[in-house]
Amino acid sequence: METLAGIKLKENGYYHGIGKLSPILIDKFKTEFDLFFEDKRKRFFSRFESNTNYSANHDINRWNMLLPSDSEMLKSGFFVQDDLFPTLQSVFDDHFALVFFSSDISSPGSAFQTIHQDGNDFAVALNVPLVDSDEQNGATHIYPKTHRLSDDSPFTNESNTFSNEDITKRSEQLKPVSLNVKIGDYTLRDLRLIHRGTPNKTAEHRPYLSSIFLPSSENVAPTFESINYGLSIFKQFKDIAFPTGKSNLIDYANTFGRLVLGFSNSDRVNRPIPKQVSDQLNEDALYCLRFAFFEDEKLNKRIIRNDKSSEELLHEIEQAKVEFDQLTK
Ligand SMILES: [Fe+2]
């Protein structure tokens, strides 16, 4: 089914849904989010041995934070509310999954980001602002239609090969649009769309919930055992990297973590979804999250976890161990 949001997303690389979600719901999310975020910051800074250049876990004064499974945010299934699910179905050629159930925070003191694509590959980010946002507190600047090869090119799910130089060149010919949003809005963004974060000039954090949907297999994934092994190596990398404060090690560890989650088609394998949460989710939400680890065993049975898929992941893990080892020398 085509939706207006899907048509706009394909044409412009983004869609701004205005007043689509209940402000009461967003208020609940904000209260819950603030506690998680405070805790996250405490845990992050406790990793470092001494004073550090790191003011946040991403760029200058920006944060990415995965959200807990035992939360109102997950239980609400907001990511399939309104006409979000048919919209996602209409833009993905085939199967997809909600791989990162996360948040992006632009904190006071954040700066302009380099103009970039989040990746060369097609994927969709759903952002739900927990506060109003404009150019005072870090609304995102976007360059409409740059998710396509050119203004005349059709929308496809194919990857592009834009280099950083290509991105700079293309953006220089265009004017960015400030994607100003209010509580109750959501935005969908093609991850190939050229954009940048802008400075937060206020004294308050600017949190967006950020759900990332990636193309996926219908129902095949590595075993939980191999994924958990990858996640344990990710933890080891972080335990070595963070106390050193060396950005090349920290970046390597984080990139490796994203690789494991990408292979898993879910960031919920070591964040099991409680039964009291999955019981509340409708079929559309359960489809998006089908690669997660559920407390409700029957929901785990929908995915075929086979050796071939596990071996591919294990191969990547072994290679990363060698590379990380070399970086530490
Ligand atoms: Fe980005």
Image: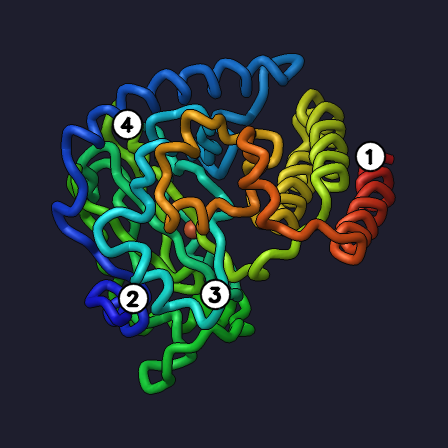
Tell me how far mark 1 sits from mark 2, CA to CA.
43 Å
Q: Label 4, secondary structure: give it.
A: helix
Tell me how far mark 3 sits from mark 1, CA to CA.
33 Å
Given this view, does label 1 or label 2 mark the residue nearer the observer?
A: 2
Q: Which quarter of the rendering shows the C terminus?
A: top right
Q: Position of residue 221 (x, y in %)?
A: 66, 52
Q: Residue, x 67% and y 45% (percent of image)?
A: 260
Q: Label 3, secondary structure: give it.
A: loop
Going by the numbered disc 1, the residue's amino acid type is Thr
Marker disc for residue 29: 4
Q: Is residue 23 visible?
A: yes
Q: Which quarter of the rendering shows the N terminus?
A: bottom left
Residue 321 position (above or below residue 218):
above
Tag count in the figure?
4
Q: Residue, x 36% and y 71% (percent of image)?
A: 146
Of labels 3 and 4, earlier in sequence is 4
Given this view, does label 4 or label 1 mark the residue nearer the observer?
A: 4
Of labels 3 and 1, earlier in sequence is 3
Of labels 2 and 4, earlier in sequence is 2
Task: Name the residue furthest bottom.
Answer: 152
Depth check: 121 or 138 in front?
A: 121
The residue to which callout 2 is attached is 9
Going by the numbered disc 4, the residue's amino acid type is Phe
Tell me how far mark 3 sits from mark 4, CA to CA.
28 Å
Of labels 2 and 3, earlier in sequence is 2
Crowd band around label 3 with a 10 angstrom C-alpha radius: few (<14), some (14–19), many (20+)? many
- Circles 4 and 1, Cβ within 8 Å, touching? The answer is no
Q: Would residue 64 appear left or right of 301 to someone viewing this image?
A: left
Going by the numbered disc 3, the residue's amino acid type is Phe
Marker disc for residue 122: 3
The residue to which callout 1 is attached is 328
Residue 152 position (above or below residue 233):
below
